[in-house]
């Protein structure tokens, strides 16, 4: 939360990002005495409070200050981690829920202000970053009527089209199109793949992995340089506990950072510091933030149990989710949990200096040259016997041996005789990763040792 001190230099204070939006104090309202101030917004001391943050009575805000406080958290995450720069094209993953609706609105407001600055600037030196929106239609995995689906998609089109210029391209892509490059019936293959997974939690996790693969495909094919997810504090808190239960402790820190560049297109989480309770409140206060009824049902299995557990914790203490995420945030991140270093001359020098200041150094992060072909989690090779890693061939890789323990026990078939058939049902991206996973991500490795490499114009000593 933002404080009221003019001398506060705390990294957690969002005052600086809110000042441009704050109304000027009403001096008449301020002279009524201390008792009346208790009935005023804790930020502007002018308007009556209409809601509370997770701090309860000590964080009573008016509507405008509440939104500005949330936007401050978002803007600080974006700025400190160089998530969005002028040359970027940003793809916002939109599900229709409160979190994705708020992140779409905040990204739009950033773009709108950048466009105003661009129009007011005579030299037009800095471009305005582009924004696209992607909605993954997962109706083929659920039993919904066609009218329900069509209505939801029409509402999404209306939400995007109603945003002020610059215009934003909308991609409505069915989840089964992840198989489109294979020239087969995607719906049937997706059904066969999910039916081959007996574990309920494994089905949900596999669908989640397919979703991020499809977002990567959309972004790559359309020239986007960032993927923005609406994952908030609450969702990340649930992931921290569920990943621990599933035995994904080694890779956990990779999933909960602001930036994840293990993918071809880096994924960023600008709402990491925003609890779902506050996002839901903002959507209910702001009538323009229309949400769409979600097309996917509630979680079950481990994910559902953890979600219910965290909900109970949150009811007992509203700050529990933040505490979980802050605690998990003390884990050492991986070398890919940062935006690749910026060398573009179109990016302001202040942005480049800021990114260099906050970027992870190789000696302060974990390194991994092997990733699970199913979920893309970083693997610790020492945990797998060399005899297991040597099984299989490039034409018929040993998928079980190259996968993480969570995918081994929840997604992959236990019967070795079924493995070949299961492998044939996977999207081509996963099959390729199973064959070439040990090659790692050499572009990231090159970045780490860039300062020690000779340039083309230098001679070796």
Image (cartoon, rainbow, N blue to C red):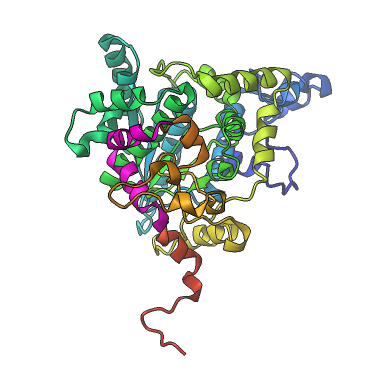
Q: Is residue 327 magenta?
A: no
The secondary structure that dominates the magenta segment is helix
The answer to which of 450 and 99 lies nearer the viewer is 450
Total numbered labels: 0
Q: Residue furthest right?
A: 34
Q: Which residues are magenta?
A: 414-440
Residue 12 lies, in percent from the top left, at 68, 42
Residue 136 lies, in percent from the top left, at 33, 28
The answer to which of 283 and 135 lies nearer the viewer is 135
Residue 224 lies, in percent from the top left, at 33, 46
In the image, 454: left or right of 360? left
In the image, 314: left or right of 198? right
The residue that appears at 56% across and 40% down in the rendered structure is 256
In the image, 238: left or right of 317? left
The residue that appears at 66% across and 25% down in the rendered structure is 53
| Residue 31 at least partly seen | yes
The answer to which of 368 and 380 lies nearer the viewer is 380
The picture quadrant where one finds residue 254 is top right
Q: Residue furthest bottom?
A: 461
The picture quadrant where one finds residue 441 is bottom left
The answer to which of 401 and 121 lies nearer the viewer is 401
The picture quadrant where one finds residue 429 is top left
The residue that appears at 29% across and 24% down in the rendered structure is 192
Q: Is residue 429 magenta?
A: yes
- The quarter in which the N terminus is drawn is top right
| Residue 132 at least partly seen | no
Residue 391 lies, in percent from the top left, at 40, 50
Q: Is residue 260 placed above or below 353 in the rendered structure?
A: above
The residue that appears at 50% across and 75% down in the rendered structure is 452
């Amino acid at each position: 939360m933002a404080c009221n001190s003019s001398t506060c230099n705390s990294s957690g204070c969002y005052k600086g990002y809110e000042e441009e939006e704050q109304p000027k104090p009403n001096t008449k309202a301020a002279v009524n005495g201390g008792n009346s101030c208790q009935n005023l917004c804790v930020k502007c001391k002018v308007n009556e409070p209409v809601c509370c943050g997770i701090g309860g009575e000590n964080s009573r805000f008016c509507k405008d200050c509440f939104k500005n406080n949330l936007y401050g958290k978002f803007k600080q995450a974006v700025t400190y981690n160089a998530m969005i720069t002028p040359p970027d094209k940003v793809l916002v993953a939109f599900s229709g829920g409160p979190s994705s609706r708020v992140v779409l609105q905040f990204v739009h407001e950033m773009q709108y202000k950048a466009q105003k600055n661009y129009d007011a600037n005579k030299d037009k030196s800095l471009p305005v970053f582009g924004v696209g929106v992607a909605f993954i239609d997962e109706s083929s995995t659920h039993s919904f009527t066609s009218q329900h689906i069509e209505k939801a998609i029409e509402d999404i089109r209306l939400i995007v089209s109603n945003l002020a210029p610059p215009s934003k391209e909308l991609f409505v892509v069915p989840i089964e199109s992840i198989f489109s490059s294979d020239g087969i019936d995607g719906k049937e293959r997706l059904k066969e793949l999910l039916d081959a997974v007996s574990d309920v939690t494994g089905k949900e996790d596999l669908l989640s992995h397919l979703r991020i693969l499809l977002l990567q495909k959309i972004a790559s094919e359309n020239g986007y340089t960032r993927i923005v997810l609406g994952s908030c504090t609450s969702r990340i808190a649930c992931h921290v506990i569920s990943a621990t239960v599933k035995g994904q402790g080694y890779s956990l820190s990779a999933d909960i950072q602001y930036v994840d560049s293990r993918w071809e297109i880096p994924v960023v989480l600008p709402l990491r510091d925003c609890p779902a309770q506050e996002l839901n409140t903002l959507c209910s206060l702001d009538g323009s933030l229309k949400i769409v009824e979600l097309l996917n049902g509630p979680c079950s299995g481990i994910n559902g149990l953890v979600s219910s557990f965290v909900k109970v914790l949150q009811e007992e203490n509203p700050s529990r989710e933040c505490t979980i995420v802050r605690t998990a945030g003390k884990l050492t991140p991986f070398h890919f949990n940062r935006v690749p270093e910026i060398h573009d001359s179109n990016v302001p020098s202040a942005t480049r200096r800021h990114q260099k200041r906050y970027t992870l150094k190789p000696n302060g992060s974990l390194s991994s040259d092997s990733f699970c072909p199913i979920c893309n989690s970083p693997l610790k090779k020492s945990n797998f016997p060399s005899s297991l890693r040597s099984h299989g061939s490039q034409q018929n890789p040993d998928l079980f041996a190259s996968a993480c323990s969570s995918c081994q026990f929840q997604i992959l078939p236990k019967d070795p005789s079924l493995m070949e058939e299961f492998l044939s049902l996977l999207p081509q991206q996963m099959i390729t990763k199973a064959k070439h996973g040990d090659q790692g991500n050499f572009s990231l490795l090159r970045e780490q040792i860039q300062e020690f490499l000779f340039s083309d114009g230098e001679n070796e000593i």
